Amino acid sequence: MNVDIRLATIEDIPALRDLIRESVNVLGSRYYTSRQIASALNYVFGVDTQLIIDRTYFIAEVEKQIAGSGGWSKRKTLFGGDQAKPDQTDQLLDPATEAARIGAFYVRPQWARKGI
């Protein structure tokens, strides 16, 4: 299996939304109730457009299809997609004193536990 890694683009956002929804609904169902999953998708899990703009969010593709995504942040926001940010001032971390943060990673269920 060949996995190609590339930077996510703004054009990928609709496909990333689908991936996140599918990943959380299917893979999360072993650990969370449907109510918890719905709440997480509404308030926490989602595309963080700032990471795409910062060029720190990546897509893993297998046979030209998105199998997973994830990235890192140089911003002070701890977690969450666009809907989780109370304001749009997503300040930069100070690299001299603050480490970058790993962002959420999502995988399409059929690719789970296969190295994506």
Image (cartoon, rainbow, N blue to C red):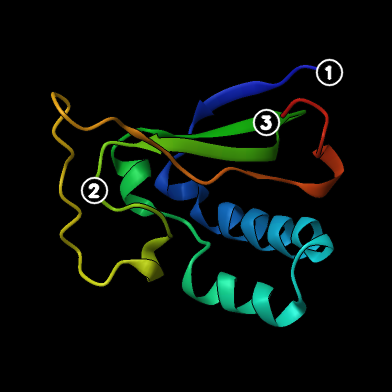
Dot placed on the residue nearer the N-terminal end, 1 or 2 = 1
Q: Quadrant of residue 38?
A: bottom right
Question: Residue 5, percent across and down?
Answer: 58, 23
The residue singled out by tag 3 in the image is 61
**Disc 1 on helix, strand or loop?**
loop
Q: Total number of numbered labels?
A: 3
Q: Amino acid at mark 2?
A: Lys
Question: Residue 56, percent across and down?
Answer: 38, 33
The span from disc 1 to disc 3 (Cα, nearest Å) is 10 Å
The residue singled out by tag 1 in the image is 1
Question: Residue 55, percent across and down?
Answer: 34, 33
The residue singled out by tag 2 in the image is 76
Q: Amino acid at mark 3?
A: Glu
**Disc 3 on helix, strand or loop?**
strand
Where 64 falls versus 49 (above or below)?
Answer: above
Q: Nearer the viewer, mark 3 or mark 2?
A: 2
Where 94 falls versus 78 (above or below)?
Answer: above
